[in-house]
Image (spheres, coloured by chain):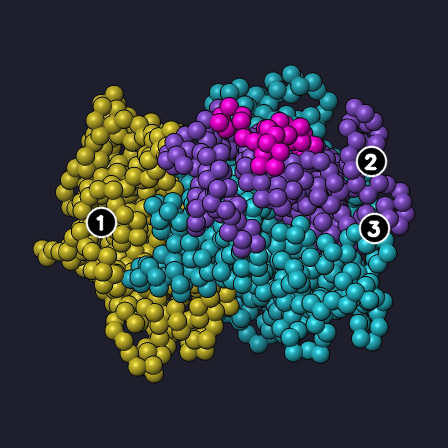
Amino acid sequence: MHYLARRTAVAAVTLLTVATLIFLLLHLVPGDPAEVLLSSGGMAPSHESVQALRLELGLDRPLGAQYASYLGRILQGNLGTSFQDHASISAEIAQRLPRTLELILASTALSLLVGVPAGLLAALRRGGFWDGLFASLASLGLSMPAFVTGTLLILLFSQTLKLVPAGGYVGFWESPGQHLIYLLMPAVSIAVGLIPVVFRMVRTSVLEFLEREWVRTARAKGLGERRVLTLHVLRNALSPVVTVIGLHLGTLLGGTVLVEYVFNWPGLSGMLVQAVEQRDYPAVQGIVLVICILFVLINLGVDVIYGLLDPRVRTR
Amino acid sequence: MTAPLLSVRNLVKLYGGRGGPFSKAAAAIRAVDDVSFDIASGEVVGLVGESGSGKSTVGRTVLRLNEPTSGAISFDGEELTRATPARMRALRRDMQIIFQDPFSSLNPRARVEEIIGEAVDLRGPLPRGERRASVVRMLEHVSLSADHLRRFPHEFSGGQRQRLSIGRALAARPRLIVADEPVAALDVSIQAQIMNLIAALQRETQVAMLFISHDLGLVEFIADRVMVMYLGRVVETAPTREIYRRPRHPYTRALLAATPSIDPRAARARPRVLLRGEPPSPANPPSGCAFRTRCAFALEACAVARPALRDIGGGHQHACLRDDIDTPRV
Amino acid sequence: MAKHVTQNLALAFLAGIVLLAILAPVLPLPDPIAMDVMNRHGSPSFAHLLGADEFGRDTLSRIAFGARASLAVAFIAAVLAGVAGVALGLVGGYFGGWPEILAMRPLDVILSFPPMLLALLTVALIGPGTETLTVLLAVLFVPTYARVAFGETLSVRHHEYVEAARALGHTAPRILFRTILSNVAGPILVQFSLVVAACILLESGLSFLGLGVTPPESSWGLMIRGARPYMYQAPMQLLWPCLALVLTVYSVNRVCDMLRDRFDPKAAVLWFPAPRKTARAASPAAVPAMGKMLDVRGLVTEIATPRGVIRALDGVSFSVRPGETVALVGESGSGKSMTGLSIMQLLPRRVGRIAGGEILYAREGAERSGASAAAAVDLARIPAARMRAHRGQEIGMVFQEPMACLNPVYTVGFQLTEALRAHGRMTKAEARARAEEELRRVGIPDPARRLNDYPHQLSGGMRQRVAIAIALCGRPRLLIADEPTTALDVTVQAQILVLLDDIRKMQGIGLVFITHNLGVVAEIADRVVVMYCGQVVEDGPVEDIFYRPLHPYTRGLIASVPQDGGSADKSRQLFSIPGTVPNPLDLPPGCRFAPRCPEAIAACTKAPPAMEAAGAGHQVRCIRWREI
């Protein structure tokens, strides 16, 4: 498929660019990279420690050689070892990545589940009570950063009502029920920011498509109202919704960083924050690279879904 | 005979076709395919064709609003395709354009005084009072008034906006105007007003005009000479009277036959000759004569070579191989 | 109205918080950094209005200085990013080609990072700090602006006024910064407020992680971070900064909505209340006149517009016999399309409604026997569910834009079989066979293959044939065609006209043909209904209308069409009707055509004229038709 091949090629180029930029960033910062990494709070690091780090990271070699070995390493799935405990970064990421993915999927599903019906209802009853109520809630939701929502949820449901634990994680296979309880609040925290986005997009595009001539034609054919709404309005409204979710993916991933921190969810982002605090640069580099790959892949997925939804994109 | 004001030779305009690194090279669309014509000072040439015939592209390319792919355009003896950007800007005041859509052709954030004033400025800087007086004179020319100076375009109806467009084009005192479907977006009763205005101002200023339209009736009303385009090529050109009385190219005839007449009895009495199919894609035109796939008179020879425009006297030229089709009475 | 209240509150709050931030150093607030261990988590008092935090620092003071930090970072970053992004977007969008690639491609690199991650990566390298944060946020949001400016410029660039500016010989910088920038300023301003909100959120998020604004400086994110471990003991210390943050972002968002409404007035639409369950009571006695299949009487249709309710149709009456072609002719605003939509009950929901009159329709054969009440329906009154059974099977409709009237995401076959199966039970295979047959009937070559095509793969004429096939596949007895050939070229228009006429003759259906084109009317109509400003002004047989028009408007309309006949005389003029169509919100009191009418007398402007019979089947709405 021509369209798919082109999107994949673009994704590959993007990945290479991202990997290169991550590599270059260390060298773009003014000053000697090893010194930059070791200096903290204005204290100059000792000459010996800088030399040791240079050798460890191979910073003494020419830039081209460094880049080549960096790319080679990545292609083998080797992201190096942590400054802190010299553990394999790849192994740690492999363990944590599924948890972050789960959080993203759960919150996206939740957002669609709430946002799509609410948007449809608001559009059909535009200017009415539900439309007004949902619109106000949406403006409020958009103004709630995920970490504030999460913190307030903990204050309300854990500290005050003592209904659910304030955070943590239980593996799915250990106890599926417990696992879902721990998943609930983090997923809701992220969804609170995403639902309004989905809601607004669904409402706008349903309103727009309702007045399209093909919808009039569908009614003129004598189709039932339910069929007109689902097949000729909602079906077409899905393309812009998919696009908008793709666009908000970056924000969504940013949200997981904060939410995982707030709820002690042992995903990638928790590891990332810790690594940044400890200025464990190889770990940060590895995690950012993996999340960016994820980002690009999900965007590619969005493009594919978009192509499936719209034959004009596919057959062009 | 004096030299023509505008002289176009072998004009070609291709669109697309440059495949990027990730898209396969698409076939170029030959929007304008080897078109040549002249416009004399003060002459009104009508350019007729259906959508996709390339008539609008000709208009824009002649003014270099689109860059031609190849060919020569000379204006008053000066070759436009070789003019520097600065020289081109200077030349533009002599060549103006009136667009089809009165709603997108005026800057929504500019007042009438600025819209017309910008064009007045092209004739050289004027003191503020004189500039305004000049704008007002122009407004009165197009049946608007000084009351309208401070208004924005959205405060006007479609017909009034088109008057503003005409005013802007004329305020620069050009020697050539390209009018690209200037009344197609207007209601019938307003159409007539604007056509009368254009015709009257043309007579008064003796500006040369390329009048582009799909409406044969309008072209007949205003043009001295008519060119008919099909799929990027000129298939016939003749003085207006001649082409409406004695159309030679099968496409011109089909076009005239398909145009509804407002005489119900005549409409019903005349035999229905329908052209089959629809125009082929300009990305993939037929070999030989572009019209042969829809032509009732096509021969095998029509597929072989592209027929050139042939002069049959009296300024009448057509690009059809056959001379043996009897001329119907239209 | 509630919208305006919250908007004004939001504006007031925003103004307050900005003032607080600016004035924080000069207000009599305690030092936000001064610790007082004795007063840890102190309750509100006169000295500490909102109490004190975990180090005994004054909360109100810290909120004020936090606002200073958050707003300054957000505002400066948004402005810096805006200037850079808009410049890149304008240049890229206007010039295209290489400038576009140079301006826009590098920004895609920034966009391929989730913003939070790029921020964390940078902080990991150079450590946290306010300046770092500001520069970082500015870089992060350059692409956002650039994309908006680029998109807007692209769409504006294709507007003809930009080409007109080029035709006037203006230089590129002048066009970019005078013509284009003022026209894309609206969306960019909206974007600015969005970016400010996003910057506040990112700044507070990073500070919350301890990676943004560094202590002892104050920031709302930092305050939430500090209060979190003690949320059970001192919940208010957590709630205050949360509230400040959420309300500020909310206010910025509301201001952004306000800007959007202002620049996109489409959003401000007036709506009718939802229709009540009980439809207008049916008048059982009403049946169509003898021999008529459709009899519209005194139809009134209202449309809600942002500037008030207009009567798009005001007492429209006409009728159609089986096998007859009736043309509804008029200019834009005459109400001809509204008539078609009213008959089909397809007026835009909650924007248009039928407010009076009758649309009487006689079912199969009923018109011959002088319709009994049982066989007649009033389409203006029957409920939506019953109307549905009439659509497609009794009355079909074809619209103007052949591209827009087919759903782009389904194949022709899907849309045609869907209609067939709505009209009667059949299997998919049967429906497909029937669909093929229907396409053949409207003259589509190779119908089996066309069934698998999507609408965008067909030419304009083919699409209109498909639309006609869809409208006719339920074997309706009446077809309403709303400007079906307007979007087509003349040679294709001629084909479609012949097709419609042939179908009418073969099936004996009634045809209501809505058009503005008098030539088309002369070709196809048996009877002509001329409309002006929501009223019928003349109604009669086609030859009467063209050879003996009575209404001055009809005459003017016919006279203004350029006719063939030698153009030797260059000074001749087209007949034209002076003036313009009146504003539907401000119609003239008497005859609606009087202000433009060459024959108008004083009486014309006094009272609205009624329709008068002027011959066999010929009616006219003019008090002077006998004299002129």
Q: Position of residue B62 (x, y in %)?
A: 25, 51
Q: How many marks?
A: 3
Q: Quarter-wise, where is residue A105 in the image?
A: top right
Q: What is the magenta range?
A: A73-101
Q: Nearer the viewer, residue C307 or C31?
A: C31
Q: Nearer the viewer, residue A275 or B219?
A: A275
The subunit carrying tag 3 is A
- C-alpha distance separating marks 1 and 2: 85 Å
User: Of helix, strand and loop, which one carries label 2?
Assistant: helix
Above or below, comparing residue C91 to residue B115 in the picture: above
- For disc 2, the marked residue is A181
Can you say which quadrant of the picture contains the C terminus of chain B?
A: top left
Residue named by callout 3? A155
Which mark, by number, is residue B239?
A: 1
Disc 3 to disc 1, C-alpha distance: 87 Å
Q: Colour of chain A?
A: purple
Pick the front one: C523 or A85 = A85
- How far, Cα to Cα, is label 3 from label 2? 16 Å
Query: Chain B is shown in which shade?
Result: yellow
Measuring 45% from the left and 78% from the top, which residue is drawn there? B147
Asked if the residue at tag 2 contacts the one at tag 1, i.e. Cβ–Cβ closer than 8 Å, the answer is no
Q: State yes or no: residue C28 in magenta.
A: no
Q: Is residue C159 above or below residue C3?
A: above
